[in-house]
């Protein structure tokens, strides 16, 4: 058994879940660093802080398993204290305290000052935009708002994150400037709902205003939009994507389904016809835009006929990027009163059908890129290849561009023009121009 350290305690931050959690961990680490604490990300430490996800069943299971793993390490004397924060802790704190009492303290999503106090640190209000970036140094997430005011019946995010709170444009510009000085070239704007940004503090949708300020930040070369809600999408943003070279021709817009009855049950505020009209508007105003979406299969009431409607729609729309998930029956959501009437094996089979179709669409679209040249940013070297991305691809979730490393050297975090020479379903192969 390890004896307790008598010197400076090292604090290990472990991050689970989505990019919003990555951002929150980076802010926590920045605060700890400013307090003179030694902090690491997913490495060995005397004190462990687990930033959990509680969105759907798989994420909750991963969070609980990680907590149990570190509690066992604590009981073996390998770590001294274990703290838990984030969405799972916000949503299930009483249950977690009862079931896993060996955790030293549980904190919610908005308990940062209290968590810092337990770690022997003070919350420093003056640290606007200061954080310890854990992504590769050339790209970073920029969270423009917290929480969500949307009423989606399947979603537990408002239970864990509360209502929408936008960060003022001035603060976000300061943060972007600080990131640029650290070498960040690509900003990935994230929120539960980008399109709602500004309604609470400016009484209007202000995503366009924010983008026009961010494109002026020296050093930032790409700005990417993640998680836009389809209802009430501000059309001025499309003009900015079209006209501003720094704003990538890319949008992540989770549409969830296309059957009008299910969209109504999901409380999405849209329909089959309205969704198609929005997509047509996107493609009319920004013809080169890559559209990424996510879909849910197995929502209560999804008959085979309704599923086939969605599958045919995916075939027609030919999305550039697509993710698909099985419906998770979440307590305290408004959909929880509905019967979870699609068997799990049927849900999983439907995911496979959609993703098999999307794989073919992606292969066909990638074949069309052969012979064309794209400006790519390179994230890493992996085996015998440099791995990069076009403006149409977000890190970790989208396609990659692979350039053989045997006869060429590419700097990580830098841009290069690459001619595509071959393509698979989710990878492009190219050579330096």
Image: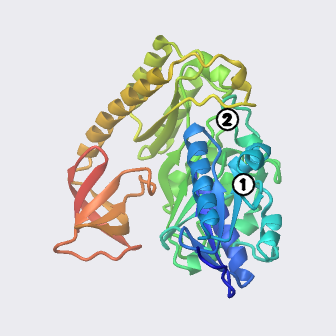
Q: Nearer the viewer, residue 5 or 42?
A: 5
Q: Nearer the viewer, residue 175 or 235?
A: 175
For label 2, count other residues whose C-alpha is less than 10 Å away and answer few (under 14), some (14-19) or many (20+): many
The mark found on residue 155 in the picture is: 2
Task: Determine which of the numbered discs, if any, sits on residue 292 in the image.
Answer: none
Quick check: 200 left or right of 192? Answer: right
Cα distance in 3D space between marks 2 and 1: 17 Å
Q: Residue furthest left?
A: 407
Query: Dots 2 and 1: beta carbons under 8 Å?
Result: no
The residue at the far front in this view is 1
Q: Which residue is mark 1?
A: 145
Image x and y of residue 255, in percent: 55, 33
* Colouring convention used in this rendered image of the protein: rainbow
Q: Residue at x 43, y 29 (%)?
A: 351
The residue sitting at 67% across, 31% down in the picture is 330
Residue 90 horizontal side relative to residue 398, left or right: right
Residue 209 occupies quadrant: bottom right
Q: How busy is the neighbourhood of tag 1: few (under 14 within 10 Å), some, or many (20 plus)?
A: many
186 up-or-down from 341: above or below: below
Against 145, is 385 above or below? below
């Amino acid at each position: 058994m390890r004896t307790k350290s008598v010197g400076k305690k090292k604090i290990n931050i472990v991050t689970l879940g989505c990019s919003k959690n990555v951002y929150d961990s980076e802010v926590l680490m920045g605060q700890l660093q400013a307090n003179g604490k030694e902090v690491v990300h997913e490495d060995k430490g005397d004190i462990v802080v687990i930033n959990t996800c509680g969105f759907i069943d798989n994420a909750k299971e991963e969070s609980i398993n990680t907590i149990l793993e570190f509690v066992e390490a604590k009981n073996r004397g390998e770590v001294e204290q274990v703290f838990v924060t984030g969405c799972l802790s916000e949503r299930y704190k009483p249950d977690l305290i009862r079931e896993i009492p060996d955790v030293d303290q549980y904190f919610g999503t908005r308990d940062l000052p209290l968590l810092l106090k337990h770690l022997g640190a003070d919350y420093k209000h003056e640290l606007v935009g200061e954080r310890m970036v854990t992504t590769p140094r050339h790209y970073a997430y920029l969270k423009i708002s917290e929480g969500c005011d949307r009423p989606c019946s399947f979603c537990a995010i408002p239970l864990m994150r509360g209502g929408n709170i936008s960060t003022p444009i001035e603060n976000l510009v300061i943060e972007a400037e600080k990131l640029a000085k650290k070498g960040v070239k690509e900003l990935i704007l994230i929120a539960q709902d980008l399109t709602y940004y500004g309604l609470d503090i400016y009484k209007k949708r202000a995503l366009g205003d924010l983008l026009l300020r961010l494109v002026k930040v020296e050093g930032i070369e790409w700005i990417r939009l993640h998680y836009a809600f389809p209802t009430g999408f501000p059309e001025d943003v499309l003009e900015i994507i079209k006209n501003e070279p720094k704003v990538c021709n890319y949008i992540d817009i989770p549409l969830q389904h296309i059957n009008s009855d299910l969209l109504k049950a999901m409380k999405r505020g849209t329909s089959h016809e309205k969704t198609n009209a929005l997509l047509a508007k996107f493609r009319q105003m920004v013809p080169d835009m890559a559209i990424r979406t996510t879909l849910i299969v197995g929502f209560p009431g999804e008959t085979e006929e309704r599923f086939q409607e969605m599958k045919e729609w995916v075939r027609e729309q030919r999305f550039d990027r697509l993710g698909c998930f099985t419906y998770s029956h979440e307590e305290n959501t408004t959909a929880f009163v509905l019967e979870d009437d699609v068997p799990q094996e049927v849900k999983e089979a439907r995911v496979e059908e959609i993703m098999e179709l999307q794989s073919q669409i992606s292969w066909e679209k990638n074949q069309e890129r052969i012979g064309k040249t794209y400006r790519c940013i390179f994230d890493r070297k992996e085996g015998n290849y440099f791995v990069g991305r076009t403006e149409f691809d977000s890190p970790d979730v989208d396609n990659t561009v692979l350039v053989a490393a045997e006869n060429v050297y590419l700097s990580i975090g830098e841009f290069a023009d690459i001619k595509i020479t071959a393509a698979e379903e989710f990878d492009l192969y190219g050579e330096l121009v």
